[in-house]
Image: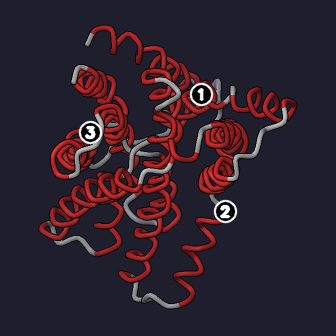
Amino acid sequence: MVEIFLRTLPFFAIIGLGYWAGRSRFFSEEATAYLTKFVFFFALSAMIFRFAANLPFDEIFNGRLILAYLLGTLAVYVIATLVGWARKLDIPTTAVEAQCAAIGNVGFLGLPMLAALFGDSAIGVVMLVLSVDLVVFSSLIVILINAGRGKGLGLATFRQVGMGLLRNPMIVSITLGMTWSALALPIPEPMNDFLLILGGAATPGALFAIGASLAGKSAERVEIAVWLSFAKLVIHPACVAIMVLIVMPLDNFTAAVAVSAAALPVAGNVYMLAQHYGIAPHRVSAAILFSTLASIATVPPVIAWLTAM
C-alpha cells in the first residue's frame, strides 16, 4: 500500500499546489474558471479523443462493464435517495445529494491518475465509466429537478437533457474517438502530435484546477458533507465491487479499474449543477472539499487491495 500511496502522492500534491494558489489569491477565481474551461474544452477532450481513437474498438466497448457499473452506481444512488427521503428532503435536494454519492471526479482526476497507475489499458474502462456518469446520471438529475419543481417530463425537459449531452465536450470526444476507432481510421502523424501536445496539458491542468477550485469551497453543513463523503468514498466502491466481482464478475483488471474509479471523490460538476439550479450548493461544496481531502487516505488502500487480487 505504501508504494501505491507514493505513486498517487504526486497527483494529490499538484491538487495541493492548486489549493495553495487559490487560497493565497495567487490564482484568482476568474483565473481558475478559465483554466478549468481550457482543460475541459480543449486539453482533456484532446486526451480522451486520442486515447479512444488509438485503442481497438473491441478493447473499449464492454456492455457487461457498462451494466455492472450502472447497477452498482444506481444502488448507492438509491441508498442516498432513501436517506434523503427519511430526512424529509424535497425531490430536487434529494437528487443533488444522490448525485454527490454517485458521481466521482473521473474526468479530471480519475482518467490521468488511473492511466498512470494501471497503464493505458485502463483508459477504455475509465471512458466507459465516465460515459455512464455523464449520459445516465447527469441526465437523471436534470429530469428529477424539473419533475420536483412541477415542470414534468415534457419536451422542454428532454430537449434540455439532449442539449446538455451534445454540449458536453467529454461526451463528444468519447463518441468521436470511439467512432474513429470503430472505423479503424489511422490518425495522421501531425494530427496525433497535435493531440499529444494539447492532451499533455490535461493532467497537470486538471489537477491544479481541482485544487484551486477547492480553495473557494465552504465547509458548511458539516454532518451532511461527512455522510455524502462516506457514501461516495466507501458505499459507492463497495456497491460497484459487489457488482463487478460477485453479481456480474468481470476480469480482475477491468474490475479493479472500475472499483477504483468508483472510489474517487465527489465530482466538481455536481457543484456547478447545484449552483445553476440553486439547490444546496453549500453542502455540495463541503462534500467535494471533505471527500477530496479524505480520498488522499482512502483511495490508495482501495487500489492496493484491488491490484493484489
* Residue holding disc 1: 203
Residue type (three-letter) at the residue carrying disc 2: Arg
The coloring applied to the image is secondary structure
Q: Give the camera-side residue of 221 and 164.
A: 164
Residue type (three-letter) at the residue carrying disc 1: Thr
Q: Position of residue 291 (x, y in %)?
A: 32, 37
Cα gap from disc 2 to disc 1, whole angstroms: 22 Å
Is residue 58 positioned above or below 147 on the image? above
* Residue holding disc 3: 233
Rendered image quadrant of residue 94: bottom left
Asked which secondary structure carries label 2, the reply is loop
- Sequence-wise, the earlier of marks 3 and 2 is 2
Q: Is residue 35 visible?
A: no
Q: Give the camera-side residue of 193 and 209.
A: 193
Cα gap from disc 3 to disc 1, whole angstroms: 22 Å
Q: Position of residue 86 (x, y in %)?
A: 12, 68
Q: In the image, which disc is placed on residue 175? A: none
Is residue 160 positioned above or below 2 on the image? below
Q: Is residue 78 visible?
A: yes
Q: Position of residue 121 (x, y in %)?
A: 49, 30
Is residue 152 positioned above or below 31 on the image? below
- Sequence-wise, the earlier of marks 3 and 1 is 1
Q: Position of residue 288 (x, y in %)?
A: 38, 42
Residue type (three-letter) at the residue carrying disc 3: Leu
Residue at position x 30%, y 25% from top?
Answer: 303
* Residue holding disc 2: 167
Residue at position x 69%, y 26% from top?
Answer: 200
- Sequence-wise, the earlier of marks 2 and 1 is 2
Q: Give the camera-side residue of 303 and 61.
A: 61
Asked which secondary structure carries label 3, the reply is helix
The 10 Å Cα crowd at callout 2, few under 14, some 14 to 19, many 20 or more, is few
Residue at position x 63%, y 29% from top?
Answer: 205
